[in-house]
Image: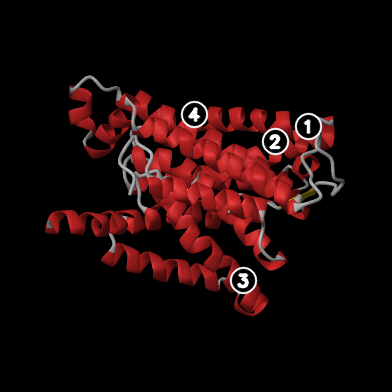
Amino acid sequence: MPERGTVSGFELLLLGIAIALAALLPSQNLQDVVIQTFLWAGLALAWNIAGGYAGLISFGHAAFFGIGAYTSTILMAHYDLTPWIGLWFGAVLSGCFAVMLTLVCARLRGPFFILSTLAASEVVRIGALNWAALTGGAEGLAILPVPGLVKMVFETKSSYAALILGYLVAVYVITKLIEGSRYGYYLLAVRDDEDAAGASGVNPLFARTAAMTLSAFLTAIGGSLFAQYFLFLDPTHVISPELSFQFALLPAIGGLGTAIGPVLGSIAITPLSEMLRSYFGGSAAGLHLAIYGFVLILVMLYFPDGIAGALQRLTQQPKSAT
């Protein structure tokens, strides 16, 4: 298992498997599962920078996700700006929103901070629903399915797989760099004991604001990629509490405050979710949420450190026995 700030053989093995899946996608039924597993792993990693390392448990990341998705799509639909550039505008806009949100709610802790982020996300969702002239409102906003590299619309799903895998690898590298840096230790110190960290010379407000800003920036990029893959945006889904809960759920199951944890959480949960949806269809809408809750309860009871923590203990047992 990987140590903090280093790259292990296990991580390289997962990377090799991911590249193989992206290059040689399996059957048509599993292509979406592979692509969404990559996407959700990257989004969970982005959330983990704020929630896992800085201790800013946010249920409002759907707002950053939606801002990124809508910004790049609106710029393309109304101003003919390529999404390759538009996604950066969405990321910067989400980062600015994260700075304001963190500064306003900096004094709140625990459930009060969580509720404030959830309320902020609802404000963005209501705004998207009511600003129909710009966002399409409840009818949604569609992207013309005309393939073209400039429009970031591809004929084959292997191209989407390669693009989203690149996003996942980039977010993972950023997470590893933070994890092994002095700033990463600052975040852990602020998360564990803010007063002690402040007494040691760490600025808790700056550390947390920077973490939330970077997390929102990367989440918005994932939102733009989501829009280009599904070619349709609906505020009730793209900026929904369900998405925010899933952002937090995957790192919690995989292992909070670790780089590999959100990836393992996505590998464990995303294929299960997609298979349940395809198997039961509309006859059991919401069943995947019940499965999420059941799995989360089991993990919290028996694996409080997540899948990564459980695997870490398994790999250390032979060493302790010798």
Q: Depth check: 175 or 316 in front? A: 316
Identify the residue shown where x is 52% and y is 42%. 120
Q: Nearer the viewer, mark 2 or mark 1?
A: 1
Query: Closer to the observer: label 4 or label 3?
Result: 3
Q: Are marks 1 and 3 in contact (CB under 8 Å)?
A: no
Q: Look at label 4 and name its amino acid.
A: Met
Say which quarter of the image contains residue 181. Answer: top left
Mark found first going from the N terminus, 4 or 3: 4
In percent of the image, x 39 and y 31: which residue is there?
A: 178
Circle 2: residue type: Thr
In terms of sequence position, does the residue under pointer 2 or pointer 1 come before the other?
Answer: 2
Check whether the beta carbons of the residues at disc 4 and disc 3 lie within 8 A of each other.
Answer: no
Q: Nearer the viewer, mark 2 or mark 4?
A: 2
Left or right of 11? Residue 242 is right
Q: Which residue is mark 3?
A: 277
Q: Which mark is residue 82?
A: 1
